[in-house]
């Protein structure tokens, strides 16, 4: 028996007669869970949300909510009967209504629908909207409009909330604060949510599960830790852009050899026969700085990220490898300087392809 709160089974998502994503399956296991779908622009993320909301029909597979089929080849529950709310990326506010009146539309839609009503003041405070309630959409910023739309959608208290790039217009300096507040709201209200975004950091923070979509397929659907540390393909590695692949030879059940870095030990996620030539994933946190080491690589770039530096190092074979170093480190290396790598190199989870 299927006990998932929400489930998509073998659905082709189509827009304008063109298939965007083929044979897609994923689920929200428990009420209140948040999942994020990642992918480049134009890949079909918005089409997925529109279809789940009932704005587009499907020809194969099924979509189920709370044990009931809401979309299939012969079933299509009308959007207004699904209790699903969709907040679009673009501004969807009524221009002749104030911010306050736009928000209250959500409360009116929810009237009598749920036993426990959302505290309006709490939502306004969490989304930092209290000071602009009397203004009109043309008088506020794109980020404020996006937060207004989000507040209105939250107040409908849907069974399923769909958010299309919900923070794309929020100022970077405020984005992390809003992410924290949004996560608190969704957890407190126990609203099951699907968020589509191109921002992997946002997805990893908000989602209990994340899916990566490209080339018309859901390529991996997993918890954020596994997506980052245990990607299932070179394509996922390249999409996340959080490391590099370098050639290596498997020399034992727990070691490899790279001609630039030497011996690397650790635990293989997938075993390879000794002597296999593989592509080893090296992520920025895998290598450690050590000025006393005899393994020196040239610094070709250095980015300051507040709590850390990201050094880009060039190996003798002209491969570029990123390395994290805490920003409190005393010796900050300049471009063209030599940077020591601690030996022996040990990577807890060795990922190879």
Image (tube, grey):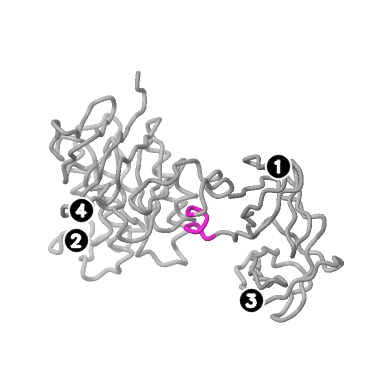
Mark closer to the observer (2, 1): 1
N-terminal of the two: label 3 or label 2?
2
Q: Earlier in the sequence, mark 1 or mark 4?
A: 4
Residue identified by numbered label 3? 301
Cβ–Cβ under 8 Å for marks 4 and 3:
no
Question: Which residue is identified by label 2?
Answer: 98
Q: Earlier in the sequence, mark 3 or mark 1?
A: 1
User: Is 304 a magenta residue?
Assistant: no
Kindly report the distance in space between the C-alpha atoms of the residues bearing marks 3 and 2: 49 Å
Mark 2 to mark 1 CA distance (whole Å): 58 Å
Region in magenta? 235-241
Residue 329 position (above or below residue 219): below
Badge 4, how many Cα within 10 Å: few under 14, some, many 20+? Answer: few
Few, some or many residues within 10 Å of mark 2 (<14, 14–19, 20+): some
For the residues marked 4 and 2, what is the alpha-carbon distance in whole angstroms? 38 Å
Residue 18: numbered disc: 4
From the image, tell me which residue sits under label 1: 267
Query: What is the x, y in percent for residue 181?
Result: 43, 50
């Amino acid at each position: 028996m299927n006990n998932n709160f929400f489930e998509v089974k073998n659905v082709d998502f189509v827009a304008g007669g063109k298939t965007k994503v083929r044979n897609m399956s994923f689920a929200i296991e428990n009420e209140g869970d948040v999942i994020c779908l990642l992918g480049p622009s134009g890949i079909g993320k918005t089409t997925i949300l529109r279809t789940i909301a009932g704005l587009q029909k499907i020809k194969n597979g099924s979509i189920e909510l709370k044990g009931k089929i809401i979309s299939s080849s012969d079933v299509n529950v009308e959007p207004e009967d699904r209790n699903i709310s969709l907040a679009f990326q673009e501004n969807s506010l009524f221009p002749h209504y104030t911010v306050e009146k736009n928000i209250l539309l959500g409360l009116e839609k929810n009237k009598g629908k749920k036993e426990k009503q959302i505290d309006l003041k709490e939502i306004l405070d969490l989304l930092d909207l209290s000071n602009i309630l009397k203004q009109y959409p043309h008088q506020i910023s794109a980020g404020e409009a996006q937060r207004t739309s989000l507040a209105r959608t939250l107040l409908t208290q849907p069974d399923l909330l769909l958010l299309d790039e919900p923070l794309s217009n929020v100022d970077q300096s405020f984005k992390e604060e809003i992410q924290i507040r949004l996560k608190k709201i969704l957890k407190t209200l126990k609203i099951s949510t699907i968020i589509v975004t191109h921002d992997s950091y946002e997805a990893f923070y908000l989602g209990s599960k994340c899916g990566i979509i490209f080339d018309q397929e859901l390529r991996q659907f997993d918890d954020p830790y596994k997506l980052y540390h245990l990607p299932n393909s070179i394509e996922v590695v390249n999409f996340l852009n959080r490391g590099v692949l370098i050639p290596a030879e498997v020399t034992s059940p727990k070691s490899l050899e790279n001609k630039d870095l030497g011996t690397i030990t650790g635990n293989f996620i997938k075993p390879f026969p000794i002597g296999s030539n593989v592509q080893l994933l090296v992520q920025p946190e895998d290598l450690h700085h050590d000025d006393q080491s005899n393994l020196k690589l040239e610094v070709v770039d250095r980015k300051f990220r507040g709590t850390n530096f990201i050094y880009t190092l060039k190996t003798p074979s002209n491969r570029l490898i990123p390395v994290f170093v805490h920003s409190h480190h005393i010796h900050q290396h300049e471009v063209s300087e030599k940077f020591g790598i601690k030996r022996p190199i040990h990577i807890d989870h060795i990922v190879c392809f």
